[in-house]
Image (tube, rainbow, N blue to C red):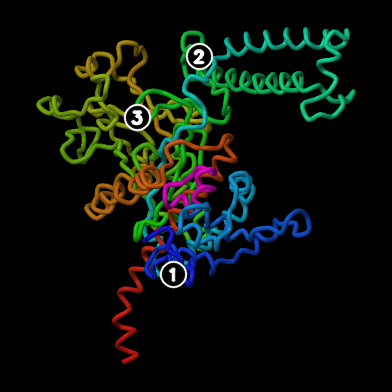
Amino acid sequence: MNRQQMALFAPTLEAMIREDDPVRLFDEVLVGVDWSAWEAEYHGKLGQPPIHPRYVAGAILYGLCRGIRSSRKLEEACCYRLDFLWLLEGRQIDHSTFSKFRVKFQGPLKELFRQVGRIAMTLGLIRLGEVAFDGTRVKANNSRYATRTAKSLEAKLAALDELFEQMMGEMEAGDAASHLQQTGDGQADSPTRLPGPLAEMQKRREQIREALGQAKAADEARDKKGRDPEKNPAQVPTTDPDSRVMPNKEGGYAPNYTPTATTDGHRGFIVDADVLAEVNEGGGAAESVERIEATFGEKPEKFLTDAGNNSGQIIEAMESRGVEFYAPVESSQPQEGNPAKREDPSIPVPESEWPKLPRNGHAQLDKSCFVYRKAEDQYYCPQGHPMPLEEIKSVLRSGVRVKLRLYRSRACEGCPLAATCLSPKSKHGRTITRDQYEEARQRTAARMAEAPARKLYRQRPRIAETTFGILKSVLGLRQFLLRGLAKVKTEWLWAVTAFNLAKLVRQITRLRAEFAPLAAGEEG
């Protein structure tokens, strides 16, 4: 087409977008959403006439679906890309508006996520028959080298304190009167407000104090776990203090967050999402079920997760909520093929079967060699000796207080299995511990041993991990743009909402194509 050719009728935006372009259906879904919660956040009488939130949110969500996350890239797309021009009806939104908008509307964004999920559920695309929960690592907006230990932070804070006192002295003496007569915004200094340079330094001191407090708390936690903080001190991010130094998926360590997603097994819609500033996502499993019920009005029937989230606390939390739990759990009781499994545990295991008894990582007889009798509340060792309850103590596991029951054998002296049963440090006989979650683990282990459960669990990688693959590869979410846990949660919610919107558009397109012949037949 000749650029200089004059046209009698200029082409319209409507004519520039194909009838089957996905942006049309994307806009159709957004038009059908209730935006009243967003509109309520607008003042309506201050400033320029506002752009309706449907257009700004639509541009952000559509941009995410097209792998555009940067506010400046969105601004550029609003000027030059036909699909964005069509979606926004020619409105050109600047990058600062996008930046402020994406962090302001966390509450309405949650409602939008809920509405999209409800639409999918109404269409039969979300069934909550089985859901898969998983977490991943996403880099924080913090260089891997911008981390400090408590010792280095103390030195940095001391240097800043000294410099701050020096500058305060100069100001009070009048040496810097001409330099500090006005603040950075051109207004005269106030006796109740620090001048610009000192205000910045004071803000920096507060940030370092906060980071120092986190570093000391992390060192105390390491010390409780038996790790010497002097030899291996905790590293605290200084740019985004809410993040945590964790292992990267690509290798090495860096400040990261742990986003989680719970995905429905029927069509792969995300039914819940969150971000944790922790290495392990297991703490968010039970809360995810509660949020799903609040969003959709019902709980999932089956909950699938990986072996990292199979703690007794999580299993019991799922059982108390009436949700079937599926995760790799090994029974601590003897199973088929284990010579320790016998009808009468008081009868010793034959000597010829001793080599077949399972060993643990320390080459000692595994816990599964010891049989527990609930009626007697005691264990029996492979030699048939009883191991009665000796004491009940309380221990701290992952921040949770757990009651631990300790059973001990008093017949270990002279036992032919002592060399493979006792540790070299043992002085009072073999012990077996049992917490209050042991029976819940046994029930889950029995369920996972059944063929239907194993078949269902093989679907977990497809359901859970595909979601993260799309979010990282297609939406480009490998590092967060925002800082601070609250803002990062909002950024993740934008991403999963865009994920669901894109999936909803594809599924509606499929459903319309499937029912089009039926509709044509009825009209005929």
Q: Which residue is painted at 60% across and 13% down in the image?
A: 153
Label 1 or label 2, whichever comes before in sequence order: 1
Q: Nearer the viewer, residue 364 or 409?
A: 364
Q: Establish if 31 lies above or below 160.
A: below
Give the CA separation, mark 2 to mark 3: 23 Å
Q: Nearer the viewer, residue 198 or 271?
A: 198
Q: Which residue is painted at 57% across and 19% down in the image?
A: 215
Three-letter code for the amino acid on which mark 2 is drawn: Pro
Image: magenta residue range: 63-77
Give the CA separation, mark 1 to mark 2: 63 Å
Label 3 or label 1, whichever comes before in sequence order: 1
The residue pinned by badge 3 equals: 250
Q: Position of residue 440 (x, y in %)?
A: 39, 44
Question: In which image quadrant can residue 40 be found?
Answer: bottom right
Q: Position of residue 437 (x, y in %)?
A: 43, 40
The residue pinned by badge 2 equals: 233
Q: Main secondary structure of the magenta part?
A: helix
The residue pinned by badge 1 equals: 15
Q: Tell me if I can see residue 395 in this picture.
A: no
Label 2 or label 3, whichever comes before in sequence order: 2
Instruction: Please state if 378 lies on the left or on the right of 142 as rendered.
Output: left
* Contact check, label 1 and label 2, Cβ < 8 Å: no
